[in-house]
Image: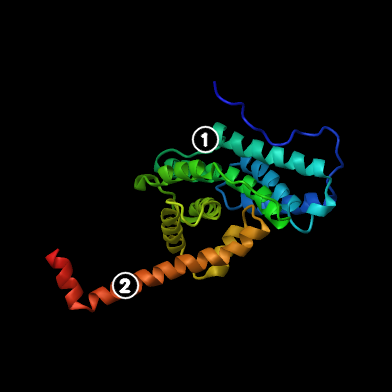
């Protein structure tokens, strides 16, 4: 017999209504995210507006001003949407035929698979802010699913449809430990995407990340991730240049 699943705190039927300012901010952020997806995917708004509400509710600006029961409800609703969209794949009906449809399926599946990482991160970041012990496990399963999905080179998205994939991988890199075996693959793939999207610097990188649900901790980490992928790229270039300019290194390689 298996153990019963552990759910988030229950929904509270009676809570204070969210303020107009809070609701307006969440809706504006949600529409900005929806514009990053292909048209005719109205389901995306219902998902991202709940993620943006949770992001705001756990921010330093709003957290102390909200009823804890409201926060519990927002957490429950966000996780419900994150799991629902992964299971039901509501984008299927609006997909075009052929290779484009396959590419968009990959994009949506990678993005949807990463959403529980975001929901968990909002709570984890909040607990860290208040110096509360934060056990962390289960993320490697999600990361491995995304890696398996993206390891097929024949179904990669193209153009702007890579942006949700980039965000999904950013959620992954934030979630994994420094010594995780998945980390090199995530960094390599993020580096590949930033090159394909022709992102010239950290500001363009952060602009894309900021168009999707995010947190204060995510925003702080964006510069670190950019620096890490930039350093890795520079190191590889220097190593290659050194190899090309050193005949003895080439001879040693030929002799192996």
> Which sits in the foreground, 148 or 197?
148
> Which sits in the foreground, 33 or 7?
7
Residue situated furthest front in the rendering = 133
Q: Identify the secondary structure beneath mark 2.
A: helix
Q: Residue 199 placed where, x, y %?
A: 49, 66
Task: Answer above or below: position of 193 versus 248.
Answer: above
Q: Which residue is mark 1?
A: 92
Q: In the image, what residue occupies the spot 55% across and 47% down?
A: 38
* Circle nearer the N terminus (2, 1): 1
In the picture, the quarter occupied by the C terminus is: bottom left
Type of colouring = rainbow
In the picture, the quarter occupied by the N terminus is: top right
Q: Residue 16 placed where, x, y %?
A: 87, 42
Q: In the image, what residue occupies the spot 31% across and 72% down?
A: 239
Pair 2/1: label in front: 2
For this view, does 107 lie left or right of residue 55?
left
Gap in Å between the C-alphas at discs 2 and 1? 45 Å
| Residue 199 visible somewhere in the drawing | no
Q: Residue 3 placed where, x, y %?
A: 58, 26
For this view, does 59 lie left or right of residue 217?
right
């Amino acid at each position: 017999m298996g153990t019963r699943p552990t759910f988030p705190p229950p929904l509270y039927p009676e809570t204070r209504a969210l303020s107009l300012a809070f609701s307006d901010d969440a809706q504006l952020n949600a529409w900005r995210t929806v514009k990053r997806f292909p048209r005719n995917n109205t389901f995306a708004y219902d998902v991202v507006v709940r993620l943006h509400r949770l992001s705001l509710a756990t921010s330093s600006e709003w957290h102390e001003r909200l009823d804890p029961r409201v926060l519990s409800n927002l957490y429950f609703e966000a996780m419900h949407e994150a799991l629902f969209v992964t299971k039901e794949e509501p984008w299927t009906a609006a997909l075009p035929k052929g290779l484009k449809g396959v590419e968009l399926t990959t994009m949506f599946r990678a993005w949807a698979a990463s959403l529980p990482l975001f929901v968990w991160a909002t709570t984890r970041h909040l607990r860290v802010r208040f110096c509360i012990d934060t056990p962390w496990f289960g993320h490697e399963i999600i990361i491995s699913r995304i890696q398996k999905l993206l390891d097929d080179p024949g179904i990669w998205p193209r153009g702007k449809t890579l942006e949700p994939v980039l965000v999904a991988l950013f959620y992954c890199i934030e979630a994994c430990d420094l010594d995780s075996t998945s980390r090199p693959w995530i960094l390599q793939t993020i580096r590949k995407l930033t090159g394909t999207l022709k992102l010239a610097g950290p500001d363009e990188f952060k602009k894309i990340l900021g168009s999707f649900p995010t947190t204060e901790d995510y925003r702080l980490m964006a510069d670190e991730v950019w620096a890490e992928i930039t350093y890795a790229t520079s190191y590889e270039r220097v190593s290659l240049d050194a190899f090309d300019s050193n005949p003895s290194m080439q001879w040693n390689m030929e002799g192996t």
